[in-house]
Image (cartoon, rainbow, N blue to C red):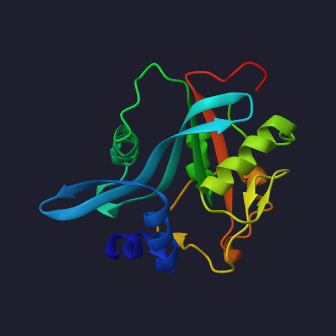
């Protein structure tokens, strides 16, 4: 909780507690005996439309101590949170995450299979899968047109970090109401998407 509060202004501790219950794994890193970072995540096998027994990586919150940022710790913690499931490296994986800021979404947009995309309506298949993934995260109000996970009415918090974001990166976040606790659901496939995605 202390690292969460140090990483977010107005940190919503109840949100973190719900996430700890929802996702099975926590990867942690220490430095000089103190917690340097943590990432929540889980790999599940799910029956998705047109993709039965699909490996799904559910990324959760990740916090890294301000003095240790920009060294790849964030990605390494996420990777380790997913490793706990023990899936083979040859599996196709649907990678998922909820984000409230374009800088977090940027890691998905580098993958051509990502959804949602600027100015492109998600297909009915993408909307179906998005709704199932949102439900796996415990989201009760999901907009399949925008991929917005409507919040509980309380902000999750605001990152205490300066992030350089281009104006066009905000486009898919236009319907996200941070004050309400909204987030954007992002999806992408590794190493490639199923046919028709």
Is residue 26 something that shows in the picture?
yes
Count how many numbered circles sit on residues in the image.
0
Looking at the image, residue 49 sits to the left or right of residue 16; the answer is: right
188 vs 48, nearest the viewer: 48
Measuring from the top left, give residue 184's x and y in whole percent. Answer: 68, 56
Looking at the image, residue 61 sits to the left or right of residue 39; the answer is: right
Measuring from the top left, give residue 14's x and y in whole percent. Answer: 50, 78
Position above or below: 53 against 26: above
Measuring from the top left, give residue 18's x and y in whole percent. Answer: 50, 70
Where's the N terminus, which quadrant? bottom left
**Residue drawn at x 76%, y 26% as measured from the top left:** 197
Looking at the image, residue 94 sits to the left or right of residue 196; the answer is: left
42 vs 103, nearest the viewer: 42
**Residue drawn at x 34%, y 62% as measured from the top left:** 66
Looking at the image, residue 33 sits to the left or right of residue 8; the answer is: left
Q: Residue 111: which quarter of the image? A: top right
188 vs 136, nearest the viewer: 136
**Residue drawn at x 49%, y 23% as measured from the top left:** 91
Measuring from the top left, give residue 99's x and y in whole percent. Answer: 60, 56
Q: Residue 4: which quarter of the image? A: bottom left
43 vs 169, nearest the viewer: 43
């Amino acid at each position: 909780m202390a690292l969460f509060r140090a990483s977010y202004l107005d940190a919503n501790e109840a949100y973190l507690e719900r996430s700890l219950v929802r996702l099975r794994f926590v990867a942690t890193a220490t430095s000089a005996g103190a917690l340097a970072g943590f990432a929540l995540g889980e790999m599940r096998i799910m029956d998705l439309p047109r993709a039965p027994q699909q490996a799904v990586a559910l990324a959760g919150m990740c916090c890294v101590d301000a003095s240790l940022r920009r060294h790849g710790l964030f990605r390494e913690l996420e990777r380790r949170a997913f490793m706990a499931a023990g899936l083979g490296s040859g599996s196709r994986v649907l990678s998922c995450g909820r984000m409230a800021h374009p800088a977090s979404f940027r890691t998905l947009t580098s993958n051509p299979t990502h959804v949602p995309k600027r100015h492109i309506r998600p297909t009915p298949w993408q909307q179906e899968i998005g709704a199932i993934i949102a439900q796996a995260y415990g989201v009760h109000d999901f907009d399949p047109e925008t991929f917005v996970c409507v919040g509980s009415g309380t902000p999750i918090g605001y990152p205490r970090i300066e992030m350089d974001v281009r104006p066009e990166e905000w486009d898919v976040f236009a319907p996200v109401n941070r004050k309400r606790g909204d987030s954007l659901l992002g999806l992408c496939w590794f190493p490639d998407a199923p046919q028709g995605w």
